Image: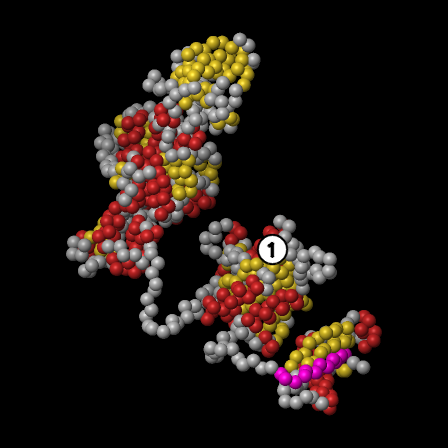
Amino acid sequence: MKFTLNWLKDHLDTEATLDEILYALTDLGLEVEGVENPEDRLGAFRIGYVQSAEKHPDADRLRVCMVETADGTQQIICGAPNARAGIKVVVAQPGDYVPGIDTTIQVGKIRGVESHGMMASERELELSDEHDGIIELGEDAQVGQRFIDYAGLNDPVIEIAITPNRPDALGVRGIARDLAARGLGTLKQADIPAVPGQYDSPIKVYLAPEVADEACPLFLGRHIRGVTNGPSPKWMQQRLIAIGLRPISALVDITNYVTYDRGRPLHVFDADKVTGDITVRFAKDGETLTALDGKDYALADGMTVIADEAGPEGIGGIMGGELSGCTETTTNVYLEAAWFDPIRTANTGRALKINSDARYRFERGADPAFTPDGMELGTRLILDLCGGEASEVVQAGEVPDTARRYILRPERVVSLVGMEIPRAEQIRILEALGFDCAEPGTVAKAMAALSPVAPLAEAGEISVGVPSWRPDVQGEADLVEEVARVASLTKLEGKPMRRAKPGVAKPVLTPMQTRTASARRTIAGLGYNECVTYSFIQADHAALFGGGTDATEVANPISSEMSHMRPTLLPGLMNAAARNQARGFADLALFEVGMAFPGGEPGEEKLLATGIRVGQTAPRNAHGTRRPVDLYDVKADAEALLATLGAPVERLMPMRSAPEWYHPGRSAVLGLGPKNPLAVFGELHPRVVEALDLKGPAMAFTVFLANIPFPKRKSATRPALTLADLQAVERDFAFIVDADLETDKLVRAAKGADKALIEAVSVFDVFAGERAEAQMGAGKKSVAIAVRLQPTEATLTDKEIEAVGEKVVAAVKKATGGELRA
């Protein structure tokens, strides 16, 4: 939303500086995105007087002009047809930058004659498209005076960001109302007297039954005859140009001006091009319309159109049609002011891909009660600027009833905002914003008598009526927000919270929140970089990970690439890795902790901690430590995280039940049984890696944070440290086993042979393949393990060590069928 400072002062009587206004706007929630000061662009140009204009000796179309400027008389070569002696002009001197031609003026020679500047046209100063000649100023212009001061162009342009819940701020008056409530001035009166009709309108209006209830409950029309559609006045053109609009004609400029001044879209039809009466109805499949932007649009059933007897003449709330548009020859017009349903307008605009100022306001909720006033304001401007005679207003439908009241408890404002805002100040703020505040026993009782559902204020409470231009206010919390933003949260002072009871306060975070934070710290400590990705992904990506079903489809996606909720965290991380690879970062370790949505019902979401590794384990170096990441890297990462979170890592069972997006032979699930998986790790399936444009292989792990059992009782201290005083003994064993045997099964069997003495078992060699089978038989391999014995009571004797060794051999043979390798 753009507006100029002087435009704002049409509605706000203020002495505040520009900086004060800018600060207040941002503090009120109308964030200032930029300020364009014409002084920076046009401040250098000054007024000059052409003393003489002689024909150039070597060019028929050029004139050698002697121009009186602030720095004395200068010789300027000019080719404009209106360059002549006796006129006052706008002069650009050497060193001045001319924005319209993107050039800095220099002293130069044109056909052998020196020129010390330039006399500018309107297009060269970006004031309009006019370039037929240089600017001619009035006799009251003073030589040496700044052009922007003379022309009244020294008017800063302010651009603010409007949130979707503030349609009232899409008009300059709404912005002025907020500033007046803050105390930066007084909101000026803006009474709009009705224009008496001189005759009955020859064009009537009808609302089709299907649109009258919701799509378009109100339509006002007025015939105005005998108008002259010339250029709009200079002041209006300057304001429209300042905010980025192109002046077209007086009739069109008036509707654009009212749209930005009051947030009220209007439309003018050339009445002589309208066939019969106007009907507001739904479009029929197959109907088309050439809109004012010159494009043809295919209309669909359910789109609101303004139609005459020949067919559609405009798309309700979005754009008029070219056929009935106003031109320079228009003498009779039909002015429209209507109210269109926000949701239907948004859906129609999105389907037709039309972005217009009218749609932008209607889909956010234009003020329905201002519709009749908007008609009168538009009529008055047309009569004042274009002449003519107005008919009686034709009305179809009624103004939508938006009246509602809510109870505001002043003490609730203080408790939620955290500032002491007096009750009287709360009432002042709300009334300055246009709300109606009633004391107990007055208006509230009257409202209650009219409507049984109207809230009745009790002692100390305030019954607040919401104005029609604030559709976003839907309860007491919204009223609190209005008071808070005007009172300014910058005045909020930090205060210590009171303790309900003496002593140590209870933990603020839940156990799961504490676990989540610990997971983030742990994974980051393992060398991963944290990512925060969207919870929405495209359907085909979701399908790769078991999602993409109707249950997880988003009803109103912001784009086609965000149509479904993510079933896991992997798609977002893989896309992030692919983008990094495309920019030359090949060795990556990324992680995310967040929610995934395998199902669409409440309770089906899962809290996951997922990491992904691609590339090499280290940068290139001279020591040969660089190697590709493998599944054992992510297995170690998953186990480290599980150990930090208190999972019994030593008791976890590896299972071949990893999801299908993992490599079937290079992945596993770690769990406390088939029904309680705690983590999954491994290499991602090449098909999935290729589908997401990732250069693999890629390794990943996911820990299911909610599946890890919490300790049954909390301990304030760590368990006692146990240190062994006796020398540990380590023995190696090599077993011949089936080639398809899972090595973990052998390790578990060996470790369980003597739980009292065996402290650890690890694999240090696997001999498999054709050479192994040639020595040990087809389908066989050799697995070598190291068994560490830790005595606690006495040093082990050779006999005791041999006894444990026999137990290990027997346990492995029983569990795996393996034989001790000779």
Relative side of 122 to 396, left or right: right
At numbered mark 1, what does the secondary structure look like: helix, strand or loop?
A: helix
What residue is rendered at 51% in x and 16% in y? 115
Residue furthest right as drawn: 774
Position of the N terminus by quadrant:
top left
Image height of 107 relative to 565, above or below = above
Residue at 33% of width from left, 19% of height from top? 140
Q: Give the x, y percent position of residue 132.
A: 45, 19
Magenta span of residues? 724-737
Identify the residue shown where x is 33% and y is 34%.
Answer: 7
Q: Position of residue 563 (x, y in %)?
A: 51, 54
Assess whether residue 679 is covered by the magenta stretch: no
Q: Which residue is mark 1?
A: 577
Q: Nearer the viewer, residue 737 or 490?
A: 490
Whether 619 is drawn above or below 202: the answer is: below
Q: Tell me the kind of residue under disc 1.
A: Ala
